[in-house]
Amino acid sequence: MTSPPSEGRPKARLFSRSTWPEARHLADVLRTETVGGALLLLGAVFALIWANSPWSDSYTRLGHWVPWPGGAPWHLDLDVATWAADGLLAIFFFVVGLELKREFVAGELRDPRRAALPVVAALGGMLLPALIYVAVVLGAGGEGLRGWAIPTATDIAFALAVLALVSSHLPQGLRAFLLTLAVVDDLFAITIIAVFYTADFHPAPLLAALAPIGLFALLVRRGRTRWWALIPLAIAAWALVHASGVHATVAGVLLGFTVPVLARRQVGAGQPTASGRQAVGGGEPTAGGTRAAEGGLAAHLEHRWRPVSAGIAVPIFALFAAGVTLRGADLGALLTDPVVLAIVAGLVLGKSIGIFGSTYLLARFTRAELDEDITWSDLCGIALLAGVGFTVSLLIGDLAFGTGSTADDRVKVAVLLGSVISAGLAATVLVRRNTAYRQVAERERLDADGDGVPDVYQRPSDR
């Protein structure tokens, strides 16, 4: 009897273990983002305290202060809060661009079969929150539809910080999945901002921005990384993209995409490269898609700028974005506001159900299955954790309703509330799963000979 054609072929594993270089890169990111997440939380809490203190007027005045009124001809007469959102967040998105390119060239997303899972999960985790938001707002009359994209974003720093705080023994595949999911999520969020939240589009400055971006790309491709050349070009690209009406943070992503990922190899003419082909010149080496880009320029710039992004840019943005005054506010009316309910439901329910459901359907209707070390309960915790939306959600809220508006205050309350609920639910699930994995690890440590009986009981003299 002949066996079916599908037999004998290995099944695709969801959340399979990463290679060692990818695991080390993941550990570096987790360490930086843990500190950045803590600073992000500190900035948000400080903003809330300051905005509701007797000195709340000084908080408002500082956010509205325009340090360079003479920048009007170049559309740069921005207040401090806008500089934080449009300027400092460009550094955050530059690092996102570097991370995205690394994932596509040398990371989890280089293999289409492995990339399918985070892409499908990210799509499910964005579509369902948007649909829930639209359904809630339409059911209440339709006011506020412009904010449909607010609950679609996952805050990578905040989510990774929560994961690092509540877990020590969770499988590496889950952590890699969350990081890759957040990176893909950021890519879709950038696309949404560029397409749906661009007002007063001016094509001439955007076309002009191609010149500094092209020069930047030429220098980094040739390995010229002098700060006095790259930073002015980056600033010029940022200013021109901002003047075009496209959100200026898109410039950061475009610049990140230009940086080579793989390290340049000094190989003599006619000598074989790592892929077995002869070297014929410079440029990025070919390595069969298996070598990590530890020595590449992208990794170098990421190591330099990720601490600036996680430790300075994002916390300062949180300081000016999270401050909402609740003194004298009708909390009952605020918490029953359709926009608030839509955002909270999108983050808490939409994100978790969208990610978990799309992953389940992918496993149900394809040959993919969970890695043997991971359970669906683990995935549930990660899906809940993806509902922590902060940085990009607040940014989209500003773009949708305008900074300082009544709707903007509602957005801040909703994003904070939805993120806290998601983090709390995720922590509850993941702490239980972490305890279970720790107990398994402890049993394996005690049972060194693998006979199923803890060695501590076999050798009383060793106790």
Image: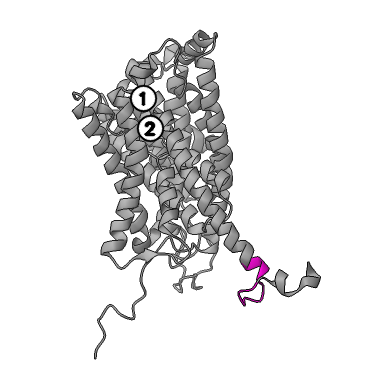
Amino acid type shown at disc 2: Ser
Which residues, given as a range, are shown in magenta? 444-453
- Point out the image quarter for the C terminus: bottom right
Which residue is labeled 1 in the image?
A: 411
- Separation of disc 1 and disc 2 at Cα? 9 Å
Q: Are marks 1 and 2 in contact (CB under 8 Å)?
A: yes
Number of marks in picture: 2
Which residue is labeled 2 in the image?
A: 393
Q: Give x and y (percent) for residue 189.
A: 34, 39
In the image, taking residue 152 as reference, residue 30 lies left or right, namely: right
**Residue 389 location, quadrant:** top left
Amino acid type shown at disc 1: Val
Secondary element type, mark 2: helix
For this rendering, which residue is in front, 176 or 347?
347
In the image, taking residue 309 as reference, residue 412 lies left or right, namely: left
Residue 19 vertical placement versus 163 (above, below): below
Tell me what residue is drawn at x 43 percent, y 38 percent.
422
Instruction: Name the front one of labels 1 and 2.
Output: 1
Q: Give x and y (percent) for residue 127.
A: 27, 43
Q: Earlier in the sequence, mark 1 or mark 2?
A: 2
